[in-house]
């Protein structure tokens, strides 16, 4: 693999919190800056695949056939309508993965192995399914860091504590470099006291791990996938698109700080 490829797992065991939206739009924003980006769709529902204009393809090359070693990543990625952005599509076959692979060797390393091929990407975003099963484990073992989208609603942090424990466990046992890149608050409603108090609570708990950019609730975001487009392409001026651009710039800033830090450590 290109030494500089950075792999992000976008994960939260809750469904509907903005994992796919965040994966797709961060990936698009970075591709717009001419970074070579790959989205790995690891959710059997295949929402990320559809959101960048492709269809889930049963039987064809996809993240399942790649993880099971049938196909290589390079043979299986598809170009999207966005220059510099590729996707490794999902397949419903991913649904049976837990059962099928649980007894085989070290099943949590399948994705890492596949992504350790010589890939020419600057960033890879793994869109995780809403469960801490084998697929999410594979994502966390393969990733450098994790982005956790948290919805601004009651019980927002439910499940995040479990995810943090899983991250620690994976770090200890399989992937020492894994770190939490950041937490992004999604679907913020400025008129709702609940939204405000949830953001306050999450910031009080996770401190500066929470990105400054908060993604507001915006109707253009759920409209975009039905047009097979990331919201940045569907309606560039919408607050949804603009807030993901801001988030991408914050993610890049953190990346620069992480890189500078690791260069410094190497130099010492
Ligand atoms: N900021 C937002 N404003 C309005 N709707 C949103 C926003 N973010 C996500 N959604 C919608 O909420 C639903 C769940 O989001 P999604 O990204 O698919 O979550 P997950 O991948 O965690 O299940 C989708 O219909 C999506 O379009
Ligand atoms: Mg999703």
Image (cartoon, rainbow, N blue to C red):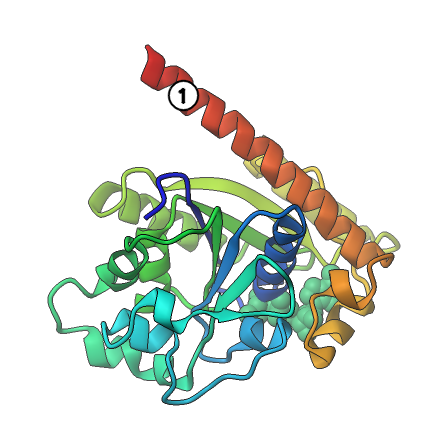
- The reply to whether residue 214 is visible in this rendering is no
List the single residue furthest toward the left.
105
Q: Is residue 192 left or right of residue 70?
A: right
> 245 or 140, which lies in front?
245
Q: Is mark 1 within 8 Å of ligand 1?
A: no
User: Residue at the location (82% across, 59% down)?
Assistant: 236
Q: Residue at x 22, y 81 (%)?
A: 100
The image quadrant that residue 168 belongs to is top left
In the displayed structure, 155 sits above or below 41; it is above
Residue 120 is situated, as x and y percent measured from the top left of the image, at: 42, 51
Q: Which residue is mark 1?
A: 263
Residue 160 x/y as whole percent? 49, 53
Q: Residue furthest bottom?
A: 58
Q: Quadrant of the C terminus?
A: top left
Of residues 70 and 196, the one nearer the viewer is: 70
Residue 216 position by quadrant: bottom right
Q: Is residue 169 visible?
A: yes
Residue 107 drawn above or below residue 237: below
Mark 1 neighbour density, 10 Å: few (under 14) some (14–19) many (20 or more) = few
**Left or right: 188 as drawn, with respect to 117:** right
């Amino acid at each position: 693999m290109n030494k500089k490829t950075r792999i992000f797992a976008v994960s939260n065991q809750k469904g509907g919190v903005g994992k796919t939206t965040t994966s797709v739009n961060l990936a698009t924003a970075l591709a717009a800056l001419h970074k070579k980006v790959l989205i790995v769709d690891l959710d059997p529902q295949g929402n990320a695949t559809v959101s960048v204009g492709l269809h889930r393809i049963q039987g064809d090359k996809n993240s399942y056939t790649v993880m099971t070693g049938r196909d290589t990543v390079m043979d299986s990625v598809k170009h999207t309508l966005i220059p510099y952005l590729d996707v490794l599509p999902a397949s419903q076959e991913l649904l049976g993965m837990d059962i099928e692979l649980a007894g085989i060797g070290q099943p949590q390393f399948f994705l890492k192995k596949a992504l350790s091929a010589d890939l020419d990407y600057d960033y890879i975003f793994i869109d995780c399914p809403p469960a801490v099963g084998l697929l999410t484990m594979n994502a966390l073992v393969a990733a450098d860091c994790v982005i956790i989208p948290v919805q601004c609603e009651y019980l927002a942090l439910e499940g995040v504590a479990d995810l943090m424990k899983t991250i620690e466990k994976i770090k200890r046992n399989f992937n020492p470099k894994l770190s939490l890149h950041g937490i992004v608050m999604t679907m913020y409603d400025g008129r709702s006291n609940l939204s405000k108090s949830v953001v306050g609570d999450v910031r009080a708990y996770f401190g500066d791990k929470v990105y400054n950019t908060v993604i507001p609730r915006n109707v253009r975001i759920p409209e975009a996938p039905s047009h097979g487009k990331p919201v940045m392409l569907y309606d560039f001026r919408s607050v949804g698109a603009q807030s993901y651009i801001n988030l991408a710039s914050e993610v890049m800033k953190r990346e620069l700080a992480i890189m500078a830090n690791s260069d410094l450590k190497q130099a010492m």
